[in-house]
Image: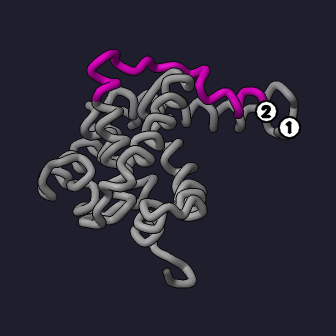
Amino acid sequence: MTADPTDEELMLAYAAGQIAAFETLYARHRGPLYRFLLRGIRPRASADECFQEVWSRVVTARERYRPDAKFSTWLYQIAHNLLVDQYRRARPEVSADDDSAPLAQLQAGEHEQPERALSDFEQRRRLQQALDELPDEQRIALQLRLEQEMPLEDIAGVTGVGRETVKSRLRYALDKLKTRLA
């Protein structure tokens, strides 16, 4: 393995029994993956369960893993499939309570300009509501592009659709957000 191994090298090392390789993979991907799931699933407890299930499936599939695609594409494909299963069971609920940190800061008096803090909170809440109103396919494509900075080809691999379909989903999602937030 190289001095700074790729995710694919780490996963192959983990499949060969090197536990430290898994720990490195987990450290690299836990934050972005958790945020991706948290934005797709409400309440937080459901996102936590899904997060654990993704990593459980990574552990279970370690010996079958083949670096045919980037590790991150494979990882997010697992997460995407779990999100789709979750959406089928129950539509996510829109809740302003999920982003309570700005409100808590406002109540604690940490901001010198409470009106601005409330305005920022309201804008984030409106954006989250607009995102929640997007069709699942558009929201997931947008999250992968903006938050994970995935190229179109990787998003296509994660979601199982063509590159042009991903482009369309992104374009429609952005158009809907612009309209909703105008």
> Looking at the picture, does residue 127 appear above or below residue 33?
above
Q: Quadrant of the C terminus?
A: top left
Disc 1/disc 2 C-alpha distance (Å): 5 Å
Which residue lies under the disc numbered 1? 110
**Colouring method of the image:** one colour
- Dot 2 crowding, Cα within 10 Å, few <14, some 14–19, many 20+: some
List x then y, in percent, for residue 161.
Answer: 14, 49
Asked if the residue under mark 2 is in contact with the one under mark 1, i.e. CB atoms within 8 Å, the reply is yes
Find out whether residue 39 is within the magenta segment: no
Q: Nearer the viewer, residue 15 or 53?
A: 15
- Secondary structure beneath dot 2 equals helix
Count of number-bearing discs: 2
Q: Residue at x 34, y 24 (%)?
A: 86
Mark number, residue 105: 2
Q: Position of residue 78 (x, y in %)?
A: 33, 44
* Amino acid at pointer 1: Glu
**x and y, in percent, of residue 46 in the image:** 49, 24
Residue positioned most to the front = 17
Tell me which residue sits at (47%, 32%) in the image: 128
Q: Which residues are magenta?
A: 85-105
Of marks 1 and 2, which one's residue comes earlier in the chain?
A: 2
* Residue 105 appears left or right of 99: right
What's the amino acid at mark 2? Gln
Residue 39 is at least partly visible in this image:
no
Q: Residue at x 55, y 35 (%)?
A: 123
Disc 1 on helix, strand or loop? loop
